[in-house]
Amino acid sequence: MELQQVGDSNFNKSTVVITESITINDANTHSGVAHIVTNQSMLTVDDSVTITIEEGKTLIPDVYNIFDK
C-alpha cells in the first residue's frame, strides 16, 4: 500500500477494502473503553459486509499516519 500526501498538509491518504464482516467488542479488543486506530485513512466496506462497533469502542482512521513512525 502506498500513501499519498495531500497537498502541503500532514494528511496521508491510504485505503483498505473490508471484505469480511467483523464485530469489534470486548472479545477481540481491550475490555471496557477502547480506541481502535486503523493504519489506513479510509475504509471501504464491501456491499455484503457489516462492521459492528459495540458500546465503549471507537474506530479511528489514522489520517495523519502518526502510528507508522
Image (cartoon, rainbow, N blue to C red):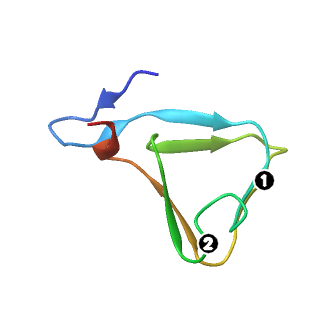
Query: How far across and how far down the image is residue 27, in percent?
Result: 73, 63
Element type at marker 2?
Answer: loop
Left or right: 64 in relation to 40:
left
Q: Which residue is disc 2 drawn over?
A: 31
Q: Residue at x 68, y 57 (%)?
A: 28
Q: Residues within 10 Å of mark 1 (few under 14, many from 20)?
A: some
In this picture, is 28 found above or below 47?
Answer: below
Location of residue 50 in the rendering, given as x and y in whole percent from the top left corner: 78, 53
Vertical comparison of 31 with 62: above or below: below
Type of the residue with mark 1: Thr
The furthest residue to the top: 2
In the displayed structure image, the side of residue 48 where residue 58 appears, left or right: left
Residue 62 vs 5, above or below: the answer is below
- Looking at marks 1 and 2 on the same chain, the residue that comes earlier in the sequence is marked by 2
Question: Toward which corner of the image does residue 44 lie, by quadrant?
Answer: top right
Q: Residues within 10 Å of mark 2 (few under 14, many from 20)?
A: few
Residue under the image location 36 percent in, 47 percent down:
63
Q: Position of residue 53 (x, y in %)?
A: 67, 66
What is the spatial separation of the Cα atoms under label 1 and label 2, in whole angstroms? 22 Å
Q: Is residue 64 left or right of residue 58?
A: left
Residue for badge 1: 50
55 left or right of 39 in image:
right
**Under tag 1, what secondary structure?**
loop
Q: Residue 6 falls in which quadrant of the image?
A: top left
For badge 2, the amino acid type reads Ser
Can you name the residue that lies furthest to the right here? 48
Q: Which residue: 79% across, 48% down? A: 21
Image: 23 above or below 33:
above
